[in-house]
Image: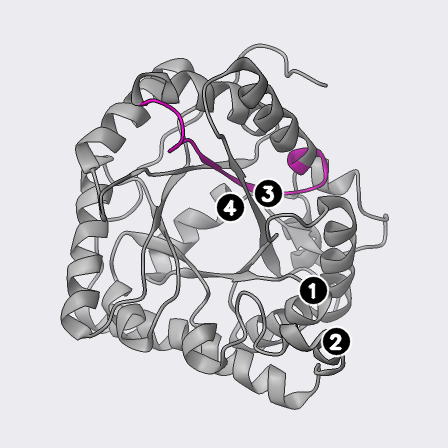
Protein backbone atom coordinates (compact mmCIF):
# COMPACT_ATOMS: atom_id res chain seq x y z
CA UNK A 1 0.00 0.00 0.00
CA UNK A 2 2.81 2.38 0.89
CA UNK A 3 4.70 1.39 -2.25
CA UNK A 4 1.64 2.11 -4.40
CA UNK A 5 1.23 5.52 -2.80
CA UNK A 6 4.87 6.36 -3.55
CA UNK A 7 4.42 5.41 -7.21
CA UNK A 8 1.32 7.60 -7.50
CA UNK A 9 3.16 10.48 -5.83
CA UNK A 10 6.01 10.24 -8.33
CA UNK A 11 3.59 10.28 -11.27
CA UNK A 12 1.66 13.26 -9.89
CA UNK A 13 4.90 15.24 -9.74
CA UNK A 14 4.86 15.40 -13.55
CA UNK A 15 1.56 17.29 -13.72
CA UNK A 16 1.94 20.74 -15.34
CA UNK A 17 1.75 23.77 -13.06
CA UNK A 18 -1.41 24.96 -14.82
CA UNK A 19 -3.09 21.70 -13.77
CA UNK A 20 -1.83 21.67 -10.19
CA UNK A 21 -2.99 25.26 -9.65
CA UNK A 22 -6.58 24.29 -10.47
CA UNK A 23 -6.77 21.10 -8.39
CA UNK A 24 -7.50 20.73 -4.71
CA UNK A 25 -4.43 19.58 -2.74
CA UNK A 26 -5.99 16.17 -2.15
CA UNK A 27 -7.08 15.60 -5.77
CA UNK A 28 -5.00 12.76 -7.26
CA UNK A 29 -6.21 13.14 -10.84
CA UNK A 30 -3.19 12.90 -13.11
CA UNK A 31 -3.53 15.03 -16.27
CA UNK A 32 -0.13 15.08 -17.95
CA UNK A 33 1.15 16.84 -21.01
CA UNK A 34 0.64 14.46 -23.91
CA UNK A 35 4.33 15.06 -24.62
CA UNK A 36 5.14 12.96 -21.52
CA UNK A 37 3.13 10.02 -22.85
CA UNK A 38 4.25 9.88 -26.48
CA UNK A 39 7.53 8.06 -25.84
CA UNK A 40 5.93 5.34 -23.64
CA UNK A 41 3.27 4.96 -26.34
CA UNK A 42 6.00 4.33 -28.89
CA UNK A 43 7.57 1.70 -26.65
CA UNK A 44 4.22 -0.09 -26.28
CA UNK A 45 3.64 -0.05 -30.05
CA UNK A 46 0.07 1.11 -29.68
CA UNK A 47 -2.01 4.23 -30.16
CA UNK A 48 -3.28 6.23 -27.20
CA UNK A 49 -7.08 6.49 -27.32
CA UNK A 50 -8.65 9.96 -27.34
CA UNK A 51 -12.33 10.05 -26.37
CA UNK A 52 -14.46 13.12 -26.92
CA UNK A 53 -16.29 13.68 -23.63
CA UNK A 54 -19.16 16.20 -23.94
CA UNK A 55 -20.54 15.26 -20.52
CA UNK A 56 -19.09 13.86 -17.31
CA UNK A 57 -20.85 10.51 -17.83
CA UNK A 58 -18.83 9.77 -20.95
CA UNK A 59 -15.60 10.73 -19.17
CA UNK A 60 -16.46 8.46 -16.24
CA UNK A 61 -17.20 5.49 -18.48
CA UNK A 62 -13.97 5.98 -20.42
CA UNK A 63 -11.97 6.26 -17.19
CA UNK A 64 -13.45 3.01 -15.86
CA UNK A 65 -12.59 1.23 -19.10
CA UNK A 66 -9.07 2.66 -19.27
CA UNK A 67 -8.37 1.71 -15.66
CA UNK A 68 -9.46 -1.87 -16.25
CA UNK A 69 -7.29 -2.07 -19.36
CA UNK A 70 -4.37 -0.21 -17.69
CA UNK A 71 -4.30 2.26 -20.55
CA UNK A 72 -3.47 5.96 -20.53
CA UNK A 73 -6.39 7.94 -21.89
CA UNK A 74 -7.09 11.21 -23.62
CA UNK A 75 -10.31 13.11 -22.89
CA UNK A 76 -11.21 15.73 -25.48
CA UNK A 77 -13.13 18.95 -24.85
CA UNK A 78 -15.78 19.35 -27.57
CA UNK A 79 -16.00 22.74 -29.34
CA UNK A 80 -18.22 25.29 -27.63
CA UNK A 81 -17.94 23.77 -24.14
CA UNK A 82 -16.58 26.05 -21.41
CA UNK A 83 -13.20 24.59 -20.38
CA UNK A 84 -13.22 25.54 -16.67
CA UNK A 85 -16.30 23.56 -15.51
CA UNK A 86 -15.38 20.75 -17.90
CA UNK A 87 -11.90 20.48 -16.33
CA UNK A 88 -13.43 20.45 -12.85
CA UNK A 89 -15.87 17.68 -13.79
CA UNK A 90 -13.38 15.37 -15.54
CA UNK A 91 -10.66 15.77 -12.91
CA UNK A 92 -13.15 15.04 -10.13
CA UNK A 93 -14.15 11.89 -12.01
CA UNK A 94 -10.50 10.95 -12.53
CA UNK A 95 -9.75 11.43 -8.83
CA UNK A 96 -12.68 9.23 -7.83
CA UNK A 97 -12.23 6.50 -10.45
CA UNK A 98 -8.59 6.41 -11.54
CA UNK A 99 -6.41 8.35 -9.13
CA UNK A 100 -2.82 8.50 -10.35
CA UNK A 101 -3.64 7.05 -13.78
CA UNK A 102 -2.06 9.16 -16.54
CA UNK A 103 -4.56 11.02 -18.69
CA UNK A 104 -4.30 13.97 -21.02
CA UNK A 105 -6.90 16.64 -21.68
CA UNK A 106 -7.25 17.75 -25.28
CA UNK A 107 -8.71 20.81 -26.94
CA UNK A 108 -8.45 22.46 -30.33
CA UNK A 109 -8.21 26.04 -31.54
CA UNK A 110 -9.12 26.89 -35.13
CA UNK A 111 -7.61 30.04 -36.60
CA UNK A 112 -10.00 31.47 -39.17
CA UNK A 113 -7.52 33.73 -40.96
CA UNK A 114 -4.38 35.85 -40.70
CA UNK A 115 -6.04 39.16 -39.80
CA UNK A 116 -4.87 40.63 -36.51
CA UNK A 117 -8.27 40.27 -34.87
CA UNK A 118 -8.61 36.65 -35.97
CA UNK A 119 -5.17 35.77 -34.65
CA UNK A 120 -5.76 37.65 -31.41
CA UNK A 121 -9.06 35.85 -30.91
CA UNK A 122 -7.37 32.48 -31.40
CA UNK A 123 -4.54 33.44 -29.03
CA UNK A 124 -6.99 34.39 -26.28
CA UNK A 125 -8.84 31.10 -26.80
CA UNK A 126 -5.57 29.15 -26.54
CA UNK A 127 -4.58 31.11 -23.44
CA UNK A 128 -7.91 30.35 -21.78
CA UNK A 129 -7.66 26.64 -22.59
CA UNK A 130 -4.12 26.34 -21.23
CA UNK A 131 -4.95 28.27 -18.07
CA UNK A 132 -8.05 26.08 -17.60
CA UNK A 133 -5.86 22.96 -17.41
CA UNK A 134 -5.77 21.60 -20.97
CA UNK A 135 -2.62 19.51 -21.47
CA UNK A 136 -2.80 18.91 -25.24
CA UNK A 137 -3.50 21.91 -27.45
CA UNK A 138 -4.14 21.36 -31.15
CA UNK A 139 -4.04 24.34 -33.50
CA UNK A 140 -5.69 24.24 -36.93
CA UNK A 141 -4.30 26.89 -39.31
CA UNK A 142 -5.83 25.51 -42.51
CA UNK A 143 -7.80 28.75 -42.88
CA UNK A 144 -4.58 30.80 -42.93
CA UNK A 145 -2.65 31.39 -46.20
CA UNK A 146 0.25 28.94 -46.47
CA UNK A 147 2.92 31.64 -46.27
CA UNK A 148 1.59 32.93 -42.93
CA UNK A 149 0.81 29.66 -41.16
CA UNK A 150 4.09 29.35 -39.26
CA UNK A 151 3.93 32.92 -37.97
CA UNK A 152 0.30 32.58 -36.90
CA UNK A 153 0.71 29.19 -35.25
CA UNK A 154 3.78 30.49 -33.41
CA UNK A 155 1.74 33.34 -31.95
CA UNK A 156 -1.22 31.18 -30.98
CA UNK A 157 0.70 28.20 -29.57
CA UNK A 158 3.45 30.12 -27.77
CA UNK A 159 1.53 30.17 -24.49
CA UNK A 160 1.28 26.36 -24.50
CA UNK A 161 4.97 25.88 -25.34
CA UNK A 162 6.08 28.13 -22.51
CA UNK A 163 3.92 26.24 -20.00
CA UNK A 164 5.12 22.80 -21.01
CA UNK A 165 1.85 21.82 -22.68
CA UNK A 166 1.87 19.50 -25.70
CA UNK A 167 1.42 21.40 -28.97
CA UNK A 168 -0.24 19.68 -31.91
CA UNK A 169 -0.47 21.09 -35.42
CA UNK A 170 -3.45 19.93 -37.46
CA UNK A 171 -1.94 19.18 -40.86
CA UNK A 172 -3.86 20.93 -43.67
CA UNK A 173 -5.32 18.71 -46.33
CA UNK A 174 -4.55 18.99 -50.04
CA UNK A 175 -7.88 17.85 -51.41
CA UNK A 176 -8.52 14.60 -49.58
CA UNK A 177 -4.82 13.93 -49.18
CA UNK A 178 -2.47 15.49 -46.62
CA UNK A 179 0.67 16.93 -48.21
CA UNK A 180 3.75 15.60 -46.41
CA UNK A 181 6.10 18.06 -48.10
CA UNK A 182 3.93 21.06 -47.25
CA UNK A 183 3.62 19.89 -43.64
CA UNK A 184 7.41 19.39 -43.42
CA UNK A 185 8.06 22.95 -44.60
CA UNK A 186 5.64 24.30 -41.99
CA UNK A 187 7.17 22.26 -39.17
CA UNK A 188 10.71 23.25 -40.15
CA UNK A 189 9.76 26.93 -39.96
CA UNK A 190 8.08 26.39 -36.58
CA UNK A 191 11.25 24.70 -35.28
CA UNK A 192 13.29 27.73 -36.32
CA UNK A 193 10.85 29.93 -34.41
CA UNK A 194 11.17 27.79 -31.26
CA UNK A 195 7.62 26.42 -31.31
CA UNK A 196 8.16 23.02 -32.94
CA UNK A 197 5.00 20.92 -32.41
CA UNK A 198 5.19 17.69 -30.44
CA UNK A 199 2.98 15.85 -32.92
CA UNK A 200 0.86 16.32 -36.02
CA UNK A 201 -2.86 15.66 -36.39
CA UNK A 202 -4.54 14.48 -39.57
CA UNK A 203 -8.29 14.43 -40.11
CA UNK A 204 -9.44 11.25 -41.83
CA UNK A 205 -12.79 9.75 -42.84
CA UNK A 206 -13.80 6.28 -41.70
CA UNK A 207 -12.41 3.72 -44.16
CA UNK A 208 -15.05 1.84 -46.13
CA UNK A 209 -13.10 -1.43 -46.29
CA UNK A 210 -9.78 -3.09 -45.51
CA UNK A 211 -8.08 -1.77 -48.64
CA UNK A 212 -9.04 1.81 -47.81
CA UNK A 213 -7.81 1.33 -44.23
CA UNK A 214 -4.41 0.16 -45.49
CA UNK A 215 -4.18 3.09 -47.90
CA UNK A 216 -5.07 5.54 -45.15
CA UNK A 217 -2.39 4.14 -42.85
CA UNK A 218 0.13 4.31 -45.71
CA UNK A 219 -0.60 8.01 -46.12
CA UNK A 220 -0.21 8.60 -42.40
CA UNK A 221 3.16 6.81 -42.45
CA UNK A 222 4.23 9.06 -45.33
CA UNK A 223 3.41 12.13 -43.26
CA UNK A 224 5.38 10.82 -40.29
CA UNK A 225 8.37 10.07 -42.53
CA UNK A 226 8.15 13.53 -44.07
CA UNK A 227 8.20 15.02 -40.56
CA UNK A 228 11.34 13.08 -39.53
CA UNK A 229 9.46 10.55 -37.43
CA UNK A 230 7.28 12.99 -35.51
CA UNK A 231 4.32 11.16 -33.92
CA UNK A 232 0.98 11.44 -35.68
CA UNK A 233 -2.51 11.66 -34.18
CA UNK A 234 -5.33 10.41 -36.37
CA UNK A 235 -8.61 12.29 -36.05
CA UNK A 236 -11.95 10.95 -37.17
CA UNK A 237 -14.09 7.81 -36.84
CA UNK A 238 -12.39 4.44 -36.79
CA UNK A 239 -13.11 0.75 -37.37
CA UNK A 240 -11.57 -2.35 -35.74
CA UNK A 241 -9.79 -3.14 -39.00
CA UNK A 242 -8.23 0.30 -39.15
CA UNK A 243 -6.99 0.04 -35.56
CA UNK A 244 -5.33 -3.27 -36.39
CA UNK A 245 -3.60 -1.63 -39.36
CA UNK A 246 -2.43 1.22 -37.13
CA UNK A 247 -0.61 -1.15 -34.76
CA UNK A 248 3.14 -0.65 -35.00
CA UNK A 249 2.70 2.47 -37.15
CA UNK A 250 3.88 6.01 -36.28
CA UNK A 251 0.29 6.86 -35.34
CA UNK A 252 0.61 7.21 -31.57
CA UNK A 253 -2.82 8.61 -30.70
CA UNK A 254 -6.21 8.01 -32.22
CA UNK A 255 -9.30 10.12 -31.75
CA UNK A 256 -12.54 8.26 -31.13
CA UNK A 257 -10.69 5.54 -29.24
CA UNK A 258 -12.37 2.74 -31.17
CA UNK A 259 -15.57 3.45 -29.28
CA UNK A 260 -17.66 4.14 -32.38
CA UNK A 261 -16.82 0.64 -33.56
CA UNK A 262 -17.30 -0.81 -30.10
CA UNK A 263 -20.57 0.79 -29.14
CA UNK A 264 -21.21 4.26 -30.59
CA UNK A 265 -20.15 5.99 -27.39
CA UNK A 266 -17.32 8.28 -28.50
CA UNK A 267 -18.16 11.78 -29.64
CA UNK A 268 -21.77 12.66 -29.07
CA UNK A 269 -23.33 9.61 -27.38
CA UNK A 270 -26.00 7.75 -29.30
CA UNK A 271 -28.57 8.96 -26.77
CA UNK A 272 -27.43 12.59 -26.67
CA UNK A 273 -30.43 13.76 -28.67
CA UNK A 274 -32.69 12.48 -25.92
CA UNK A 275 -31.51 15.21 -23.57
CA UNK A 276 -31.53 14.31 -19.91
CA UNK A 277 -31.97 10.62 -20.60
CA UNK A 278 -28.33 10.32 -21.57
CA UNK A 279 -27.26 11.45 -18.11
CA UNK A 280 -29.09 8.53 -16.56
CA UNK A 281 -27.30 5.95 -18.72
CA UNK A 282 -24.14 5.51 -16.68
CA UNK A 283 -24.55 1.89 -15.70
CA UNK A 284 -22.84 -1.39 -16.61
CA UNK A 285 -24.04 -1.40 -20.24
CA UNK A 286 -22.23 1.83 -21.10
CA UNK A 287 -19.12 0.71 -19.24
CA UNK A 288 -19.11 -2.56 -21.17
CA UNK A 289 -19.31 -0.73 -24.50
CA UNK A 290 -16.45 1.55 -23.51
CA UNK A 291 -14.33 -1.39 -22.43
CA UNK A 292 -14.97 -3.14 -25.76
CA UNK A 293 -14.03 0.03 -27.59
CA UNK A 294 -10.78 0.59 -25.73
CA UNK A 295 -10.12 -3.12 -26.03
CA UNK A 296 -9.63 -2.63 -29.76
CA UNK A 297 -6.52 -0.63 -28.90
CA UNK A 298 -5.17 -3.41 -26.71
CA UNK A 299 -5.79 -5.98 -29.45
CA UNK A 300 -4.16 -3.74 -32.02
CA UNK A 301 -1.14 -3.23 -29.78
CA UNK A 302 -0.73 -7.01 -29.43
CA UNK A 303 -0.95 -7.37 -33.20
CA UNK A 304 1.79 -4.76 -33.53
CA UNK A 305 4.00 -6.66 -31.10
CA UNK A 306 3.65 -9.75 -33.25
CA UNK A 307 4.44 -7.86 -36.45
CA UNK A 308 7.27 -5.71 -35.07
CA UNK A 309 7.66 -2.03 -34.34
CA UNK A 310 7.12 0.76 -36.81
CA UNK A 311 9.00 4.05 -36.88
CA UNK A 312 9.19 5.74 -33.48
CA UNK A 313 8.72 9.39 -32.66
CA UNK A 314 11.66 11.70 -33.13
CA UNK A 315 10.61 14.80 -31.25
CA UNK A 316 13.60 16.73 -29.95
CA UNK A 317 13.96 19.15 -27.10
CA UNK A 318 11.79 22.27 -27.26
CA UNK A 319 13.19 25.71 -26.63
CA UNK A 320 11.44 28.27 -24.43
CA UNK A 321 11.76 31.91 -25.38
CA UNK A 322 10.36 35.27 -24.42
CA UNK A 323 7.85 35.83 -21.61
CA UNK A 324 4.33 34.60 -22.20
CA UNK A 325 1.64 37.01 -23.22
CA UNK A 326 -1.42 37.38 -21.03
CA UNK A 327 -4.67 38.98 -22.05
Q: Nearer the viewer, residue 154 or 96?
A: 154
Dot 4 and dot 2 residues touching (CB under 8 Å): no
Q: Is residue 81 left or right of residue 43?
A: right
Earlier along the polypeptide chain: callout 2 or callout 3? 3
Q: Which residue is mark 4?
A: 34
Q: Which residue is mark 3?
A: 135
Earlier along the polypeptide chain: callout 4 or callout 2? 4
Instruction: Specify whether residue 17 is in view.
Output: no
Dot 3 and dot 4 residues touching (CB under 8 Å): yes
Residue beneath the point at 74% across and 76% down: 279
Q: Nearer the viewer, mark 4 or mark 2?
A: 2
Q: Position of residue 163 (x, y in %)?
A: 61, 28
Earlier along the polypeptide chain: callout 1 or callout 3? 1
Q: Which residue is mark 1?
A: 55
Q: Residues within 10 Å of mark 3 (few under 14, many from 20)?
A: many
Q: Nearer the viewer, mark 4 or mark 1?
A: 1
Secondary element type, mark 1: loop
- Quadrant where the N terminus is found in the figure: bottom right
Secondary element type, mark 2: helix
Earlier along the polypeptide chain: callout 3 or callout 4? 4
Secondary element type, mark 3: loop
Residue beneath the point at 76% across and 81% down: 280
Residue 38: assigned label: none
Dot 1 and dot 2 residues touching (CB under 8 Å): yes
The total number of labels drawn is 4
- Quadrant where the C terminus is found in the figure: top right
C-alpha separation, residue under disc 4 versus residue under disc 2: 29 Å
Q: Which residue is mark 2?
A: 279
Q: Position of residue 301 (x, y in %)?
A: 33, 70
Amino acid sequence: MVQGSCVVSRILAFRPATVVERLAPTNAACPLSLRELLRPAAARRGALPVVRAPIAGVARGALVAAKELQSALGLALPPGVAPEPWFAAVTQAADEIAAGMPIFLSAEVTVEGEDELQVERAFHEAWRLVEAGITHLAVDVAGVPAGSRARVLDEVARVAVERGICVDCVVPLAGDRPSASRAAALFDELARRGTAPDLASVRCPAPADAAEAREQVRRLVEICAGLSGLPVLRRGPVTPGLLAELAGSPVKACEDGGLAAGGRVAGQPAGARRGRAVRRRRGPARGARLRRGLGFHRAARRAGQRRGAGPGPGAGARRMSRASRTP
